[in-house]
Amino acid sequence: MLFTSFQFILFLTVLFVVYYLIPKKFQWMLLLLASYIFYSFAGSKYLFYILITTVSTYFTGRMLNQIQSISAAYLKENKETLTREDRKAYKAGMKKKQRRWLTICLLLNLGILGVIKYLDFTIGNINSVLDLLKVNNNLPLMGFVLPLGISFYTFMSVGYIIDVYREKYSYEKNIAKLALFISFFPQVIQGPISRFDELKETLFAEHSFNTTNISFGLQRILFGFFKKVVIADRLLVAVNTIVRDPSEYQGVYVLVGMFFYAIELYADFTGGIDITIGVAQVLGVKLPENFERPYFSKSIVEYWRRWHITMGTWFKDYIFFPISVSKSMLNLSKSCRARFGDAIGKRVPVYIATIVTWFATGIWHGAAWNFVVWGLGNCLVILVSQECMPLYDKFHNRFHVQHTLWYRLFQVMRTFWLMSFLRTFDCYRNVPTTFKMYGTIITKGNYQELFQGGLMQLGLTLSDYIVVIFGVVLLLMVSLLQRNGSVREKLAAKPYIIRYATYFAILLAILILGAYGVGYNASQFIYSQF
Amino acid sequence: MKKKILINIAAVCFAVLILFLLQELFMPKYVSEIREGSLIEEYYDDEKDNDVIFIGDCEVYENFSPITLWEKYGITSFIRGSAQQLIWQSYYLLEETLKYEKPEVVVFNVLSMKYDVPQKEAYNRLTLDKMKLSMSKINDITASMMEDESFISYIFPLLRYHSRWSELTWDDFKYMFHKPKISHNGFLMRVDVKPVTVIPEGRKLADYQFGQNSYDYLDKMTKLCKENDIELILIKAPSTYPYWYDEWDAQMVQYAEENNLAYYNFLEMSSEIGIDFNTDTYDAGLHLNLSGAEKMSNYFGKILSEEFKVPDRRNELDTSMVWEKKADYYYTMKEDQLRELAEYGYLKSYGALVQNNDTED
């Protein structure tokens, strides 16, 4: 069920009415039922996977809690008799037991994700090697279909179980509540990747009919629809025209494709997240923000702090930090310091953790080499930027430009284009083609074509371009306004006529200018494919 | 609080009004182009006192002239035809029609038996968009929708035609609330001529058996007519293409016999009817032109009045007055089309001048 389908609007309307009519203590149960109904629309057989993840996560959490309780009770009872070493040894033993359970759980859940998402990729690579070795016996591909949101709910459950292992919070005793956390339908398609301790506060709470919450939620849904169907789905046509025919669209068209894809992806992903957060808000549930005006970032590091925030923090908390502060990494750092000096020694764990994190980020986005290259490309730019920091500092100290508007604009544009270049790997889905297309930007020399009718050959009419420009200007204005606080709150302070005219104008823009219905292909959200 | 509620109600009413106006604006008007799109809705504005109702595809709305049936035999009739009307659409249109009136005879053109599943969204729209909302329409939509269509867009067509914002013409504003009459009781007039040069042979088919879905709806139609004491006549209009196979014809003959219905294959009777495919068709045999339709109606009117005893109502004063007015419009359009044909060598507006006068009236 697509978020932008009439079916989803009907589903949401029915859920909304029932949600506020039933006794409040049943609300979270209704959400669980609705989530499973929503999930089963993608294919009821895929419920099996999410159920395995839920059950395994629940029982592991329970086991971890049991071990933690036994451990705490034992230490309390024998507080007087145990020496410090005994306590340490006992704790280590119990931690080992916990780690065993955790490992089993992670192997199972990440294993499901790994097999379904990456087995064919692995087999494909093995077959390529066999071909190179002229071995004819190729391995057959398994052709697994990726269950809806598997990357997102697996990461959420992994985050939960690691947090329980780390004793950040206690395990959830009610399996149905855990099931709701893992399957909560608005976020199962494309995130955000919520944390259990944050989400449970509102997810399982009893909610009264709150007009402000509902109004704000609906406004956010409306704006999400606007971004998705008016801007993203319209630009999708031009982007597809360019990237699906790399032999025809080269040179300046590659740049146009990059630019359009940057806008499309932003409108698509942030639009989807707006709908997600808006739907949750209408139901009284608070989801974490996933974006903070990322295209205003002045560096790639800042960009990644503001784009897909929950994914970034997930990788940081569960991959980057555990690797960089692990015992083996500290030992490695120590030995490097001894052999190559402090400068290299302190960089080694950070470099290794960064490379692993970005490799994982890349492969998480898709089982293909272009995503790996994209991830490592980001990693390279980040590490090079870090190494260049002293140079930047010198430049800033010498010229005092970093607070001037034009220099900040330059930094924003630089980051935007740098990210757009890297993102091209996502478009062409093929590493050699992407590099070839990069080359044509310089070699093709067809820049004049663009204004000699070239733009009109990308599947968009003049009216479409006008709509896109109007949409982008609106997004830009909203982003600028957001810097000084919530736009919805500002709007709420305006007279009725201005508020209602704004809501209605957005609704009309969606209904009239939206790229939906016959003649347009109903497109999935880009991130739902990851 | 009360003020807030009133403001909200006013805002919702205003929004609904604007959306309604936009829907009316964006829906295709079918006046200057694709005129057959107007056929379904014209029925609702007409007198509902017909003794004969035609249902079916272009082979009824192009090949039969209700004015001729009236003038020659005093038969009142209406054609509820639409482009590529599928059999379930014919059934639901008939079901809807019977809520307005009860004719003596229903005539169904059987060409649509060959389509067992929905065919094309564009044709669905021509039949369904302007049907009034009723259970018949809802069932019709459900039966007709293609896989990628949404039900809601038939109920609120703005969701279908929203993208027309960039192609609106003056006609869309001009005909937003009132459109000129296009048809003559469902008959779409064309006076131009394009003779048949070749009668194409039918391609061999893997299976000549009509589908079960088609038969189910034909059964429903038969049952509906019997329940309402209406004579159902099955016909195959005299169009040379799409090809009408002997195997198909045999199935219709058998069905008619089994259900005690009349079946006429007018294609086989073309010479008897007097149709000259050099002068009586405007598109090389697919459809008859005005001359062909009048010949066809003249022939069929005789059958209706003699064999089915459809009454001659020319002596009813009120009815006569209504039909005389219809005939006037018919002949004025005919003259205008002939004038256009003489002036331009082709039909430029299909009698738009007459239509515009009608609007002004």
Image (tube, rainbow, N blue to C red):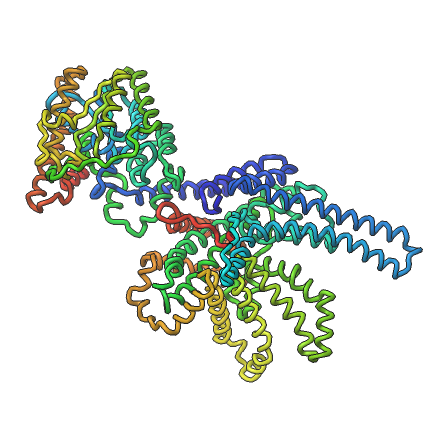
Q: Give the percent coordinates (x, y) of residue A160.
A: 67, 51
In the displayed image of the protein, which residue is found farthest to the bottom?
A398
> In the rendered image, which quarter is residue B354 located in?
top left
Q: Give the percent coordinates (x, y) of residue B135.
A: 38, 28
In the displayed image of the protein, which residue is found farthest to the right?
A81
Counting every numbered tag in the picture gives 0
Q: Give the percent coordinates (x, y) of residue A385.
A: 57, 74
Q: Give the percent coordinates (x, y) of residue A181.
A: 63, 46
In the drawing, does residue A252 fall left or right of residue A383? left
Q: Is residue A223 above or below residue B216?
A: below
Q: In the rendered image, is residue B322 in sight?
A: yes
> In the rendered image, which quarter is residue A403 located in?
bottom right
Q: In the rendered image, is residue A274 in sight?
A: no
In the displayed image of the protein, which residue is found farthest to the left?
B342
In the drawing, does residue A222 fall left or right of residue A101? left
In the drawing, does residue A409 fall left or right of residue B244? right
In the drawing, does residue A309 fall left or right of residue B315? right
Say which residue appears at 15% left-offset and 26% top-offset.
B268
> In the rendered image, which quarter is residue B49 located in?
top left
